[in-house]
Amino acid sequence: MQIRTFRLKPKQDLFDEIESYVATQHIEAGCLLSSVGSLTHATLRLANQNIYNEYEGHFEIVSLNGTISQHGSHLHIAISNEKGETIGGHLVRGCRIYTTAEIVLAEFEDVVYRREFAEDSGYEELTVHPR
């Protein structure tokens, strides 16, 4: 296992930058270990919904986790506003960094993660293959 850390800067797109990092580093299997930061705009897909919800304001990233791969990632985020109200869902494009996002991830060097259609769920789901 290899641990990697990087920082994102104001106005960058959280999802796009994580995906870009995973692609340029050729990471085939891994997970997010830790992340902290803030957003000025959030776009989330909430549970069991096919639409995206958008939120404007100042938000703290209180949780960000999931599996990552250059073959497809699956990430969830929870954010809180200035009142401490928290909302979470699937991380998608459109979350803009306010001051920073500090990302720590683990790369697993013995497996490859892929996304393949699963009849039991009807979605592209994680499959694990030996490297």
Image (cartoon, rainbow, N blue to C red):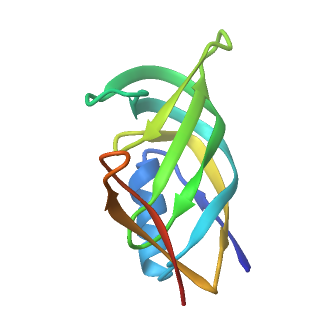
Position of 55 with respect to 109 (left or right) is left
Q: State whether residue 64 is above or below residue 125.
A: above
Rendered location of residue 103, percent (x, y): 64, 57
Say if residue 76 shows up in the picture.
Answer: yes
Q: Which residue: 50% across, 49% down?
A: 75
Rendered location of residue 65, percent (x, y): 61, 48
Say if residue 12 shows up in the picture.
Answer: no
Q: Which residue: 48% across, 32% down?
A: 89
In this view, the residue farthest toward the top is 83
Position of 72 with respect to 89 (left or right) is left
Q: State whether residue 28 is above or below residue 64.
A: below
Q: Which residue: 37% across, 45% down?
A: 121
Report the quarter where the C terminus lies. bottom right
- The residue closer to the viewer here, 61 or 26, is 26
Q: Which residue: 41% across, 27% down?
A: 46
Rendered location of residue 41, percent (x, y): 42, 30
